[in-house]
Amino acid sequence: QKEVEQDPGPLSVPEGAIVSLNCTYSNSAFQYFMWYRQYSRKGPELLMYTYSSGNKEDGRFTAQVDKSSKYISLFIRDSQPSDSATYLCAMSASAMGGAGGTSYGKLTFGQGTILTVHP
Amino acid sequence: DARVTQTPRHKVTEMGQEVTMRCQPILGHNTVFWYRQTMMQGLELLAYFRNRAPLDDSGMPKDRFSAEMPDATLATLKIQPSEPRDSAVYFCASGLKGAEAFFGQGTRLTVV
C-alpha cells in the first residue's frame, strides 16, 4: 500500500461546478501538505501549501487538512476550463529549514487526479 | 523571474549511451531535489541535496545513476549506461524553507 493514495480519476465537470479532490495517507509524521497543478508537458506548479490541520483559502481554491482522519482535500469553486490539469497532492514530514534528521522537505506525492472542466 | 531551469528539455538517445541532465535551482535555494515521473509510478524521489551535500539518493539505481552539485547554481543527474526503462520525465526542484518545493519544466528522456 502506498503512503499517499489519490484517486486518479479522470474527473470531468461542467464549467462553474465545484470540484473536490482528495488524498488519504498513512504516515502520521506528515505535517506539511501541498497541492500542485500540472498542465500537460509542464512541471508541477505549487498551488496550495498548508502546515498541520486546518483550512486555507486562496481565491477559488480551498485546501483542507484533517490529520485525525489522515485526509486532505482541495476544493475548486466556479471551475474554469483553464483549471483542466492534473492535480497532485504532496506531503512532507519535515521542513527544509529544520534541524536534525535527513529528510528535509522530502515530498511524497499522490498519483495525481486528471481534471477536465468542459465549457 | 525566479524559476528552476532544466536542460535539455527533450533528449532522445540510444540504449547504452550516457545522458546528462542539468538543473539551475532558484538563486538562494539550498535544497535541490531530483524526481522522476512515469505514468505507472507517478513522481518518485531519486536524490536530494542540502547545501550541495547529498542527503539521500536511495531512490536511484546506484549502478547507473549519479547525482552531483558541482556548485550552488548547478545540479547534474547522469545515467550511464542508459536503458529503455529509464525513459521518463526527470524533474529538478529547489526550495529553502518549509516544505515548498518549486519545480522546473523537466527533461523528457526517451531511450531507444
Image (cartoon, coloured by chain):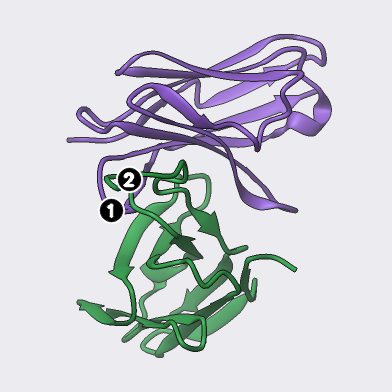
Chain colours: A green, B purple
Please give the name of the residue rendered at 31% of the width and 66% of the height, measured from the top-left corner: A48
The reply to whether the C-beta atoms of the residues labelled 2 and 1 are less than 8 Å apart is yes
Please give the name of the residue rendered at 26% of the width and 31% of the height, measured from the top-left corner: B26
Q: Position of residue B62 (x, y in %)?
A: 72, 23
Q: Is residue A47 shown above or below B63?
A: below
Q: Chain of mark 2?
A: A
- Respond whether the residues carrying marks 2 and 1 are from the same subunit: no
A59 sits to left or right of A104: left
Q: Chain of mark 1?
A: B
Q: Which residue is mark 1?
A: B98
Q: Is residue A80 shown above or below A99?
A: below
Q: Which mark is residue B62?
A: none
Q: Which residue is mark 2?
A: A96
Please give the name of the residue rendered at 41% of the width and 60% of the height, measured from the top-left corner: A36
Mark 1 burial class by Cα count in 10 Å: few <14, some 14-19, many 20+? some
Please give the name of the residue rendered at 32% of the width and 63% of the height, measured from the top-left corner: A47
Residue in front for this viewpoint, A40 or A87: A87
B40 sits to left or right of A54: right
Q: Which of the 4 image quarters holds residue B95?
A: top left
Q: Residue furthest front?
A: A100
Inspect the image, locate mark 1, and give the three-letter code of the amino acid beneath it.
Answer: Gly
Q: How many marks?
A: 2
Inspect the image, locate mark 2, and give the three-letter code of the amino acid beneath it.
Answer: Met
Residue in front for this viewpoint, B11 or A6: A6
Q: Is residue A108 shown above or below A52?
A: above
Mark 2 burial class by Cα count in 10 Å: few <14, some 14-19, many 20+? many
Q: Position of residue A32 (x, y in %)?
A: 37, 64
| Secondary element at tag 1 | loop
Quarter of the picture containing the N terminus of chain A is bottom right
Q: Is residue B90 shown above or below B78?
A: below
A86 sits to left or right of A36: right
